[in-house]
Structures are given as C-alpha cells and as structure tokens.
Amino acid sequence: MRKMHKFGLAAGLSVALLAACGDNAEENNNAAGNDNADNAAEENNGADNNAAENNAADDDADNDGEASGSDYGEELEYTITGIDAGAGIMSAAEDALETYDLSDWDISASSDAAMTQALGDAFENEEPIIVTGWTPHWKFSEYDLKFLDDPEGVFGEAEDIHTFVREDLESDMPEAYQVLDNFQWSEDDMGEIMVSIQEGMDEEEAAREWIDANEDMVAEWTDGVEEVDGEQIDLVFVAWDSEIASTNMIALVLEDLGYEVSMDPLEANFMFQAVADGQADAMVAAWLPLTHDHLVEEYGDSMEDLGANLEGARTGLVVPEYMDIDSIEDLQ
Ligand code: PBE
C-alpha cells in the first residue's frame, strides 16, 4: 500500500491544483457563453491589462495574426509564464533574461499545473504565451509548440535525468538499490504515462498500464533481484508532470517487489536535501548537467548518483507554433 504526504506539504499543492482547475472551469464557461470572441478576449484581459494595451493586442490579432517580438512584449505585459520558483528552469530563464538583454521581461512563478492551464487558455483564443517548458512533457502531444532558439546556449544541450539515492542504501536495501541502479527508460516511455494521466487516468493506474505493456523492460531492471517483505522505502519527487510519471512508475515496480513505498512531493531543494540527509531513500528526478547543477553542487557529496535513467530531455522557452517568433533573441 502506498503512503503519501509524509512531509505534510502535499496539502498545499493539492489546494493549488484545485484552484487552477477552478479557474479553468470559469474561463471555459465565459468563453462558451460568449458568441463574440472579441468580447471573450476583452473579458479575459480586462482583469489586469489597461485598455490601451488591449486595443493594441486586438488590432494585431485582427490584422494578420503577426507581431514582432516587441509587440508580443506589450501583449504579454513582458511576462513569461513560469512554474514553481524552486525549479531549475526558473533560474535558467532568469539567466536567459540577462544574457539576451531582456530587462523589460519578468518570469511569473506558479506551478506546472498552472502553467499548462495558462497554455490551454492561450490556445483556446490563439493568444500569444511564452512558458518555461521541457520535454518529456505531454503538452507537446496536446498542443503545437516550439522551443525558441537559444543561440547563447543558456538552457544547455540535452539534459539527462539521474537517479540519486541516500548514502548506505546499497547495504541497507540492496534489492531496491539494484532496481534503482538498473532503471533506465526513454522519453517516449515517460511520455506515454504522462499522456494517459493528462487524458484523465489515475496516476497509479497509468503507471500500472505502462508496466503491464513493458514487462520485458521491467524484467531487466528486476532481473535476479530478490523479493522483500514489506520493507518501507521513501521516495521523494517534485510535482512536475514528468516526475509524477516516473516516480509513480518506479514506486509500483518497488511495490511489486514487496516494498511498502511512500511518495512525497516536495520543492526541488527539499527533494535533494531529503535524500542527502537520509530522510528519504531515493529520487529519480535530478536533471543534469545544467538544470539541477546548483543542487547537486550543494547536496551531491552526501548522496549517491546512480546515473541517468533517461537521456535526451530538454528545457527552454516554449511558445505556440502560431506565434511569429523563433528565437529568444526575437524578444529583444
Ligand atoms: N523541470 C522538469 C525541472 C526538472 C524537471 C524542467 C521543470 C526543473 O526545472 O527543475
């Protein structure tokens, strides 16, 4: 049986997720109840924009759907839609503002759930939006999106996602250690679980479905590993959709081996700290070499890096295909 919420932070997260869902319903109703798209757009903007900016934005949209980077700036109130403040991609995005001289721009902190919500709202009205984005992520299957070019390489090249375990896990829990050490899958694998969850499947069910469909791969990870008898193992993660998918999946594999698994969502730095302190046993959510570099620098010496469980992930600034910009430089 899986335990959740040991660190008591999940309650706050759930509230944030619920709030995001509530917003969604309200905006959908507005849009649906409105025959005139312009009115709907005006109502959506009205809350925080001034009238002049709304008009400018509407004119662009009405004319030819094209706007230069600076027009997008005004339309977006020079705001990039970010995720949780502790995410590595948020610091990378701040670096990007500096490197590309985008001092007019800000990054708003929210959450993965709120960011994808905003993305959905933008697509509904074909409005511009810039988000901190990454792959693997279901948003790329749901929406036509593109990464903005990053000629200065602020977001780095491809990232790998590493598994880290606490010191002494190998001697304390050799079976779990072996599985975690063997665990390796692809972007598509992770993506399948993410899409199922996005389509409404329960997280654990989506992970189970993937495991059932990929028995051979799972059998490689557990090859020769002895079953255990209800030993407790604590996994930590951050509630990014990618990590929700991977952590649920590996938790089930460990449960199938006989472990009692707890899964606790934390902020990124607390996730690293928990493993470094030995409060938690493992996490499968460290993005390297760049995204979590500062956290590995701080905590890496006190834990064990079991290497990449997924190769070829990517982070950056992401926009709808219908936007007429291709590079972060276009925002200048
Ligand atoms: N992410 C997803 C994380 C790592 C996993 C890119 C949002 C981050 O930025 O820290």
Image (cartoon, rainbow, N blue to C red):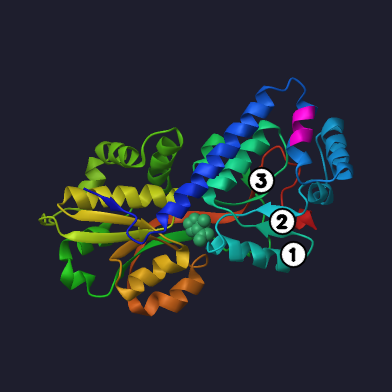
* Residue drawn where x is 25% and y is 47% of the image: 252
Residue 186's place in the image compared with 36, above or below, is below
Dot placed on the residue nearer the N-terminal end, 2 or 1: 1
Q: Position of residue 211 (x, y in %)?
A: 27, 41
Q: CA distance from mark 2 to mark 1?
A: 7 Å
- Quadrant where the image shows the C terminus: bottom right
Q: Is residue 312 visible?
A: yes
Q: Residue 32 or 209: which is nearer the viewer?
A: 32
* Residue drawn where x is 39% and y is 72% of the image: 273
Residue corresponding to mark 2: 328
Q: Is residue 264 left or right of residue 107?
A: left
Q: Are marks 2 and 3 in contact (CB under 8 Å)?
A: no
Residue corresponding to mark 1: 100
Estimate how packed mark 2 is, as few (under 14), some (14 to 19) or many (20 or more) residues with alpha carbons within 10 Å: many
Q: Position of residue 26 (x, y in %)?
A: 62, 33
Q: Mark 1: which amino acid?
A: Tyr
Region in magenta: 39-43
Residue corresponding to mark 3: 319
